[in-house]
Image: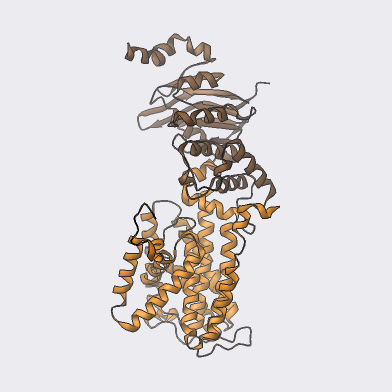
């Protein structure tokens, strides 16, 4: 009965999805020597998915999403250093820290234009960056927070040098958050977010409490970014100022643009492409990799992803395509 | 039988030195087909914005079913049944008509905060959504993204969205504005077939539509109510002729 309803059908898992995730979970085993980069990709993919919830689905432009990544990273690192080394409890601490900061910062994005939001989110991240820099008795300042030791996962699996356990850990957390986000965007709640994105005036005129929707989704995305931060600190055993850097915030926007906004797999795909591109290009020209990334981005945006992925349409006429 | 659903008492809105709304007291009855007319700049749009909560009045009160809603936020008024359509379509471009209406119905049924269940999994939502799609002749385009719809269809969706909120009072802001002649009939029939218990306040320039549709007319001039009455009374009112209808004759004459 409900099977015939295409709205409910949209939310159903496609056959390729479990295959994709199983393949992703197999990668640390298949490419053992690349487990470190797989771990890193999983973490930035989670970060990108969290940004997509606010940018792609709700239309909140942010150039300061690293605030939550960084806050989660430092919280988890400090917790491990001073309280207890258990990774799962630390992950929870990082997530909660990101969530609380998100709830607080959400007050700043409720009003104003896109430009206001870009500036406010950027400004808040700069403030956090300098705080982490200045409070060196707590954060280690510019040297970063060192001497973070993380206990074994579930009390059994030690984090190994290859990063296999780390990669599995990050992939599983990514998968769990992805499932949650996927539920959310297909739900009535998710539909009202898209309504707010498409037409805020009308969203208000049909009774959607727009401001509450904005702050709820912002808080939630911040919590997810906090989880990504916690994973980063735990799997590298380190938290440094770079987690709050503008590059972090800008990179994640780039990943979404590369993979496509308003589509959860866009964040994942963008993270994979961005990181691989980084790795490959940096291998060829370590100093000038930004040049190639920049060029790629310009071509992608001007030509369009669709067209770029379908070379056979390059020489056909516009009308035919 | 004549119960007042919407009532305004001495509504005033001043923008600096200009009074866009001057001491307007309206009574809209249950099931009314009430038209609000007036020349450009008469303050019709300001009045709608006051009623829906986009603007805050400088003075006066707004009562819906006897409850004072003057200070309620826009979305809270919608929940109480004060719903509007827009003169210029305000739609959700990336959603299809089905997604749009299911979303609006879910929100109206209080499911808008539900995140763990897919949209379209609630039988009540689907039923009402299908009913609206059929009523507004949107069944055949239910899966087309709104941005690709023909103008007439978008206009229908505009009104369908408002009706999905189960209004007590429906404010129709120039519903046929810009609709091509071929698609006009369908829209007019739909407007005529709106549920009888819904009070409709129609803001319109098109006098043919006003006199065909309305059973009661309020004439607004310079932000104040000039005169009110049945269509016959308004058509024969010398004041209205002079200020409003007569104005046109004077120009043409």
Q: Residue furthest bottom?
A: A161
- In which quadrant of the rendered view does residue A178 lie? bottom right
Q: Which color has been applied to chain B in this rendered view?
A: brown
The spot of residue A294 in percent (x, y) is: 31, 70
- Residue B165 visible in the shown view: no
Chain identifier of the orange chain = A
The spot of residue B27 in percent (x, y) is: 56, 23
- In which quadrant of the rendered view does residue B180 lie? top left
In this rendering, the answer to whether B195 lies above or below B107 is above
- The residue lying toward the viewer, choosing from A221 and A258, is A258
Horizontal arrangement in the rendering, residue A314 relative to residue A44 (left or right) = left
- The residue lying toward the viewer, choosing from A270 and B53, is A270
- The residue lying toward the viewer, choosing from B169 and A4, is A4
Image quarter where the C terminus of chain A lies is bottom left
- Residue A143 visible in the shown view: yes
The spot of residue B213 in percent (x, y) is: 54, 22
In this rendering, the answer to whether A317 lies above or below B197 is below
Horizontal arrangement in the rendering, residue A286 relative to residue A33 (left or right) = left
Q: Residue at x 64, y 52 (%)?
A: A5
């Amino acid at each position: 009965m409900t099977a015939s309803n295409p709205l409910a059908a949209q939310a159903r898992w496609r056959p390729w999805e479990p295959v994709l995730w199983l393949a992703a979970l197999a990668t640390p085993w298949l490419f053992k020597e690349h487990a470190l980069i797989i771990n890193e990709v999983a973490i930035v993919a989670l970060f990108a998915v969290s940004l997509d919830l606010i940018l792609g689905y709700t239309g909140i432009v942010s150039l300061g999403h690293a605030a939550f990544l960084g806050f989660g990273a430092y919280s988890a690192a400090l917790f491990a250093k001073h309280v207890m080394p258990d990774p799962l409890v630390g992950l929870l601490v990082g997530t909660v820290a990101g969530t609380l900061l998100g709830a607080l910062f959400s007050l700043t994005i409720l009003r104003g234009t896109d430009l206001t939001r870009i500036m406010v989110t950027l400004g808040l991240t700069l403030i956090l960056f300098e705080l982490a820099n200045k409070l060196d008795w707590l954060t280690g300042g510019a040297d970063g927070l060192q001497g973070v030791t993380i206990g074994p996962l579930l009390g059994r699996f030690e984090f190994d040098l290859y990063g296999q356990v780390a990669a599995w850990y990050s992939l599983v957390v990514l998968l769990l958050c992805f499932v949650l986000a996927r539920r959310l965007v297909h739900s009535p709640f998710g539909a009202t977010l898209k309504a707010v994105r498409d037409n805020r005036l009308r969203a208000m005129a049909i009774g959607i409490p727009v401001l509450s929707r904005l702050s709820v989704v912002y808080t939630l995305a911040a919590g997810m970014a906090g989880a990504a931060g916690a994973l980063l600190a735990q799997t590298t055993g380190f938290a440094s100022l770079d987690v709050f850097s503008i590059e972090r915030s800008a990179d994640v926007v780039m990943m979404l643009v590369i993979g496509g906004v308003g589509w959860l797999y866009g964040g994942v795909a963008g993270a994979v492409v961005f990181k691989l591109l980084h790795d490959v290009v940096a291998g060829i020209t370590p100093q000038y990799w930004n040049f190639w990334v920049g060029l790629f981005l310009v071509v992608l945006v001007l030509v369009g992803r669709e067209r770029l992925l379908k070379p056979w349409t390059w020489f056909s006429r516009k009308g035919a395509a | 039988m004549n119960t007042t659903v919407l009532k305004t008492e001495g509504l005033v809105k001043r923008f600096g030195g200009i009074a866009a709304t001057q001491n307007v007291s309206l009574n809209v009855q249950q099931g009314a087909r009430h038209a609000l007319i007036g020349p450009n700049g008469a303050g019709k749009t300001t009045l709608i914005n006051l009623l829906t909560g986009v603007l805050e009045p400088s003075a006066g009160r707004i009562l819906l079913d006897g409850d004072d809603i003057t200070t309620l936020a826009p979305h809270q008024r919608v929940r109480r049944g004060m719903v509007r359509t827009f003169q210029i379509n305000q739609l959700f471009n990336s959603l299809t008509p089905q997604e749009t209406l299911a979303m609006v119905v879910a929100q109206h049924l209080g499911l808008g905060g539900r995140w763990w269940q897919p949209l379209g999994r609630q039988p009540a939502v689907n039923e009402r959504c299908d009913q609206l799609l059929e009523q507004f002749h949107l069944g055949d385009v239910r899966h087309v993204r709104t941005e690709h719809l023909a103008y007439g269809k978008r206009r229908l969706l505009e009104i369908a969205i408002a009706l999905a909120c189960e209004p007590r009072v429906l404010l129709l802001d120039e519903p046929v504005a810009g609709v091509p002649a071929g698609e006009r009939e369908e829209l007019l029939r739909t407007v005529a077939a709106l549920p009888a218990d819904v009070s409709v306040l129609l803001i319109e320039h098109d006098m043919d539509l006003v006199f065909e549709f309305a059973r009661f007319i309020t004439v607004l001039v310079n932000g104040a109510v000039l005169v009110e009455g049945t269509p016959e009374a308004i058509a024969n009112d010398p004041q209205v002729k002079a200020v409003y209808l007569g104005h046109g004759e004077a120009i043409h004459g």
